[in-house]
Amino acid sequence: MTDSTDSDYTKRTSWRRLTVFSLIFMALTAAGLYTVYDQFAGRSLTFDPRLVAPSTLFLAGALLLVYFASDGLRLHFTLRALGHRLPFRVLFRLVFINLFFSNVTPMATGGGFAQIWYLHRHGVPMGRATAATTIRTVLAVLFIFTLTPVFLLTLQALKDHSVTGSIGVALAVFIGLYLTFFAILLFRTHWLIAPLTQLLVMLRRLHLISDARHRRWQFKARREMLRFSDSFGDYIKGRPLFVLLSVLFTALFLLSLFSFPALLMVSLGYDIDYLVSLGLLVVTTFVMYFAPTPGASGISEGVFGSFFRDILSGNHLVLVTVSWRLLTIYLGMIIGLFVLQRELMKERRYPE
């Protein structure tokens, strides 16, 4: 009876937190869009019917299919390299659950935990699930962190820009810290056991967890971290085809993600340089990795508006900003919310 009550309380608390984070996400998004409207668009906003023309909707729908499919397939082939295979319907539900969680939690931390929880529920051991989601993230980070300095140094549109001036100073530090952390996580996982042990000891001393839970968590944490370390070695030694496909679908996922603004601008009649648009989105995404707000809300809209204000007219800038976020984030989040609700309803009906 107590376990059931604790479980119900935990679920209610989690939903309250998600609701609070969702409200923060919406408020910061509105603030970011208003900043674009007020500071970069000259308080100009006009709806253009070309954005909802059949040809635009068809191309946007096709690009969305590539975007969502490649997101699911990059995790699919990472899991295959690790020796696990899940039904595609399970993986593609995870795509939308991840989109929801990663955009309503600060620094996108919730997305990773949600994926691990979901994969574990479908039979993937915790260490393997952690390895799969971490490797998927590392592959994307390597692409973005490699391309960002290139575009910062070569794109004329980014030279002498106030935002990139700040990035330029911190760029080496950010990249160094991020890559060092992932290198330790992947190649020297056992180094993290001692800090994690100290964290659990601190939680017990603060009476946030009981002695029994402390012992149980400490044992599980050590076991899963060692399994995670072994799993990464298994990925490297996995079937070369699966490893290669996980990298290729990561590249396709990012390419489709970065192509939405170019598609929107072409549909509005702009003659744009695709490489410039691509580069601006790479740097925008780089900034979003360090945004402390849920889903980089507010910050992503502001940075996007700042970068594209010299390309788009004032009456189109807010419109393209909203459309970009709608296609790449808002739509997936809404679908993810419904998918998550269905998954939780199944869990209540058929508890493990």
Image: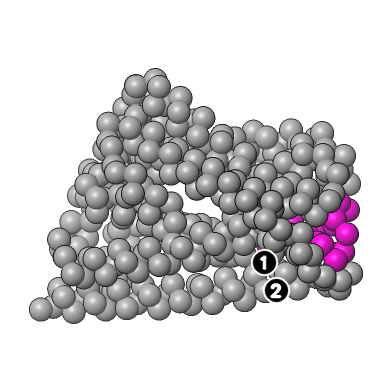
**Alpha-carbon distance for marks 1 and 2?**
6 Å
Three-letter amino acid code of the residue under disc 1: Gly
The color scheme shown is one colour
* Rendered view: 232 above or below 163: above
Q: Is residue 309 magenta?
A: yes
Q: Position of residue 339 (x, y in %)?
A: 38, 63
Q: Which mark is residue 162?
A: none
Q: Image point 40% across, 67% down: which residue?
A: 338
Does 229 sit left or right of 260 as displayed?
left
Cβ–Cβ under 8 Å for marks 1 and 2: yes
Does 3 sit left or right of 182 as displayed?
left
Q: Which residues are magenta?
A: 299-318
Residue 15 visible from this viewpoint: yes
Q: Sequence order check: which comes first, mark 1 or mark 2?
A: 2
Quadrant occupied by the C terminus: bottom left
Residue 280 visible from this viewpoint: no
Residue with the mark numbered 1: 298
Does 237 sit left or right of 211 as displayed?
right
Q: Callout 1: helix, strand or loop? A: loop
